Image (spheres, grey):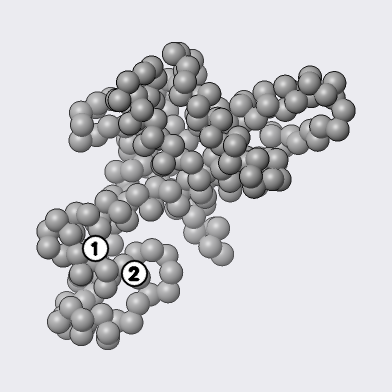
Amino acid sequence: MNDSPDHATRWTLVRRAQGRGEVARAALSELCSIYYEPVLQFTRRWCGDAERAKDLAHGFFEDLLGRENLGAADPAKGRFRSYLLAAVKHFLSRQREHAAAAKRGGGVERVPLDEAPEPGVLPDWEREFDRAWALALIGRALESLAGEMRDAGKGAQFEVLRPWLDGGPAGDAAAAGEALGLSSTALKVAIHRVRQRFRQRIRDEIAATTTDPADAEAEFRHLVDVWVGGRG
């Protein structure tokens, strides 16, 4: 796995986040900012309380990344998404067990984290987690592309073409062409190119969470399916 500054994978960030010091705090902050929303949505579904879910999500990252040895955090095992989902399930199960022990089982709602869906069908909770994960990666890809185009002096072009990227209704082609001084044909070319760059940025974000190119491609197809399905 390439650990160069230009390709700091999520596994690299996990290792950096262990221990103390500025490097560890910076890595922890980045991990939390990237994956806070998927974890928060999962914990909210588990406990049914928005405020408690925030505390649990924060506690999860503190618990996970405060250990000297993350144990199951093994890059050789593949996708970081799968690792993080399993880790949050384990954390919440322990929270439930602790609450049950404190109250001797009284008044504690036992919510199963592992359902038994039909073969090949994701439980609703996992699909929600995956969709939030996809949205987080897409958001980072958009930010990355926006920065790239601003650096190239094309920030205004990005803003005009953004409606063709973020999954919402397509923009007004006539207005976009007029704003950019492009003909209809030239606008289509510009939209095609920015979509290609955006797609590559998404793939780059996904590649940072896997260790195998084949795994990254499967992850890309899965997350696109989850994202598109969630918009239906």
Q: Position of residue 87 (x, y in %)?
A: 55, 27
Q: Image point 34% across, 64% down: which residue?
A: 165
Badge 2 element = helix
Q: On screen, 41 above or below 116?
A: below
Q: Which of the 4 quarters of the picture holds residue 168?
A: bottom left
Q: Position of residue 65 (x, y in %)?
A: 46, 24
Residue 122 in the image, given as x and y percentages of width and height: 62, 43
Q: Residue at x 27, y 86 (%)?
A: 174
Looking at the rendered structure, the kind of residue marked 1 is: Val
Instruction: Confirm or deny contact between disc 1 and disc 2 (CB under 8 A).
Output: yes
Q: Residue at x 27, y 69 (%)?
A: 159
- For the N terminus, the image quarter is top left
Query: Is residue 118 visible from the viewing direction of this image?
Result: no
Q: Which residue is mark 1?
A: 194
Q: Amino acid at mark 2?
A: Trp
Is residue 39 among the parts visible in the rendering? yes
Q: Circle 2 is placed at which residue position? A: 164
Residue shown at the point (71%, 37%) measured from the top left: 115
Circle count: 2
Q: Position of residue 18 (x, y in %)?
A: 39, 19
With respect to residue 195, does 67 lie above or below? Answer: above
Q: Quadrant of residue 172?
A: bottom left
Q: Report whether 206 appears left or right of 67.
A: left
Give the mark, 1 or 2, whose residue is nearer the N terminus: 2
Circle 1: element type: helix
**Circle 1 crowding by C-alpha within 10 Å: few under 14, some 14–19, many from 20:** some
| Mark seen at residue 228 | none
Q: Residues within 10 Å of mark 2 (few under 14, many from 20)?
A: some
Who is closer to the viewer here, 222 or 131?
A: 131
From the viewer's perspective, is 8 left or right of 39? Answer: left
Q: Toward the viewer: 221 or 3?
A: 3
| Mark 1 to mark 2 CA distance (whole Å) | 9 Å
